[in-house]
Amino acid sequence: MELGHVLSEGKTKIVYAHPTDPDLAILFHKDGITAGDGARRHVIAGKGALAGQTTANVFRLLNRAGIATHFVDAPEPTLTVVRRCVMIPLEVVMRRVPAGSYLRRHPEAAGQRFDPPLVEFFLKDDARHDPQITPDEIVTQGIATPAEVEQMITTGQEVFTTLEAAWATLDVTLVDLKIEFGRASDGTLLVADVIDNDSWRIWPGGDPNRMLDKQVYRNAQVVDEDVLADVYARYAQVAELTGRWEV
Ligand code: 5GP
């Protein structure tokens, strides 16, 4: 499809204006994969198309569940048409099981289960390695209103439980998940950005040794062709599995 001008470019996607509708934008999913705030970076041919497919599968499910998201359509595997938003510079992380940075901060929590899912906020700032930020700091720094913080917590938990239930039908445990929000032109808060295999920890049968997500790439001591082929295979599997949620 025809693209408008570039609005912004990140490590894994380019955001284009829509050629005719100012209320829409188009995400192009790139083949890049990065970790460690961009310190590690590779290109995996076809990864962008798989990311686009997974994102479309996830957002269609969320839209069907009645959750307000920016997703409109996916006319091609690498392209996502979305409602244009001003992004809120926060990563909103929901956790059912302590893992990753939470376990490093709270080693005593190993084996615990959060019900409802725990919600944490991180400020998007690569130079400062995305520091954690409290709801009070979000409000006092003018990043979001108290009502928006409440909504991000409630909607975040709803997104988590919706995806958790979908993965459970495939005997896959959703461990944690990162999402982002944006404000549409009318001020409505929408689940925005991408939600793909870079955004969560997913453990088939609840077994971390069988993880299908990006953590495989983050954990690799040395990244060679075999590791990249293995990462591609897992992303392909996740695109196929999330496609089964389609009714
Ligand atoms: P943790 O804080 O334990 O490192 O990550 C929690 C969850 O958020 C994991 O599922 C992880 O994949 C996701 N996450 C954390 N930071 C980022 C990020 O910068 N980009 C993406 N795509 N996901 C992230």
Image (cartoon, rainbow, N blue to C red):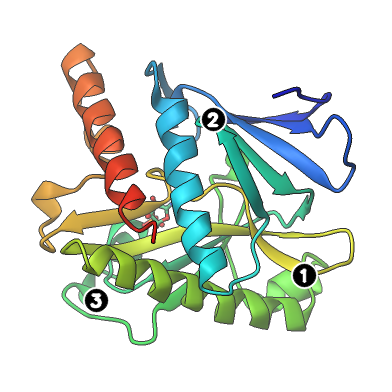
Cβ of mark 1 under 8 A from ligand 1: no
Q: Nearer the viewer, residue 61 or 13?
A: 61
Residue at horizontal 27 percent and vertical 48 percent from the top: 241
What crowding class fits label 1: few (fewer than 14 Cα within 10 Å), some (14-19), or many (20 or more)? Answer: some
Instruction: Please give the residue where the numbered disc 3 appears in the rendered image.
Output: 109
Residue at horizontal 22 percent and vertical 45 percent from the top: 212
In the picture, residue 114 is in which quadrant? bottom left
- Please tell me which of labels 1 and 3 falls first in the chain: 3
Mark-to-mark CA distance, 1 and 3: 29 Å
Cβ of mark 2 under 8 A from ligand 1: yes
Residue 160 lies, in percent from the top left, at 42, 70
Instruction: Please give the residue where the numbered disc 2 appears in the rendered image.
Output: 12
Q: Is residue 126 left or right of residue 218?
A: right
Q: Is residue 89 left or right of residue 130?
A: right
Q: Nearer the viewer, residue 192 or 76?
A: 76
- Please tell me which of labels 2 and 1 falls first in the chain: 2
**Which residue type carries mark 2?**
Thr
Q: Is residue 74 left or right of residue 83?
A: left
Above or below: residue 170 compared with residue 32? below
